[in-house]
Image (cartoon, rainbow, N blue to C red):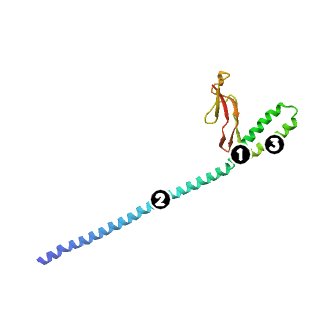
């Protein structure tokens, strides 16, 4: 072999190695571009899923708020009518003592029942509180404390001053009570 042949044979593998390296680099670049696109797709898909879930939660929340608004839309009106309801109850208690006003009592009772049934149709419900029930600061409003007439009434409700009411599941007026000390 001549010197020229040796140089040619030696140079040929180097050229092929350069070509192979170029092909390998372009494949790795393609793979990185492909991998980059896959990562971008995964990120966008995750972003989309989060946004979709957030929108679904928003729809549920607004639907619930709308239902709550419809059920308690008349809360202000009913709150303003509660003192009238209390006045009717006081009037009925005083009329019962007077035997001569039987017809008046019947008329007042009729109007009271009609008002009460109308408010109940709109979602109003009495909160049932009796003497001797345990006092709970979350459910009752204590007006005052008096010495308990008996030992078993200490920390319990002695008297109910004003009835409490709920509108649907929401308490719109807590019962006002006197508790034993």
Q: Count numbered badges in the picture.
A: 3
Residue 80 seen in the figure: yes
Toward which corner of the image does residue 11 lie, by quadrant?
A: bottom left
**52 and 96: which one is in front?**
96
Whether residue 3 is situated above or below residue 92 in the rendered picture: below
| Quarter in which the C terminus is drawn | top right
Mark linked to residue 47: 2
Instruction: Identify residue for label 3.
Output: 111
Near mark 1 (Cα within 10 A), the count class, few <14, some 14-19 or many ≥20, is many
**Mark 3 vs mark 1: which is more N-terminal?**
1
> Which residue is painted at 72% across and 40% down in the image?
83
Relative to residue 139, is residue 10 drawn left or right?
left
Q: Position of residue 103 (x, y in %)?
A: 87, 37
| Quarter in which the N terminus is drawn | bottom left
> Which residue is painted at 28% across and 70% down in the image?
22
**167 and 59: which one is in front?**
167
Near mark 2 (Cα within 10 A), the count class, few <14, some 14-19 or many ≥20, is few
């Amino acid at each position: 072999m001549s010197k020229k042949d040796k140089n040619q044979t030696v140079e040929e593998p180097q050229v092929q190695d350069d070509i192979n390296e170029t092909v390998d680099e372009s494949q790795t670049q393609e793979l990185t571009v492909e991998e980059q696109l896959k990562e971008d797709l995964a990120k966008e898909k995750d972003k989309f899923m989060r946004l979709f879930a957030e929108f679904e939660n928003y729809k549920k929340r607004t639907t619930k708020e709308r239902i709550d608004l419809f059920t308690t839309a008349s809360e202000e009106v009913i709150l303003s009518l509660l003192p009238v309801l209390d006045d009717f109850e006081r009037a009925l208690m005083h009329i019962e003592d007077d035997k001569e006003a039987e017809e008046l009592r019947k008329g007042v009772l009729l109007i009271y029942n009609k008002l009460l049934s109308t408010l109940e149709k709109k979602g109003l419900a009495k909160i049932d509180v009796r003497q001797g029930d345990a006092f709970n600061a979350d459910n009752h409003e204590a007006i005052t404390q008096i010495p308990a007439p008996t030992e078993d009434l200490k920390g319990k409700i002695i008297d109910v001053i004003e009835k409490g009411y709920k509108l649907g599941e929401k308490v719109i007026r807590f019962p006002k009570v006197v508790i034993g000390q």
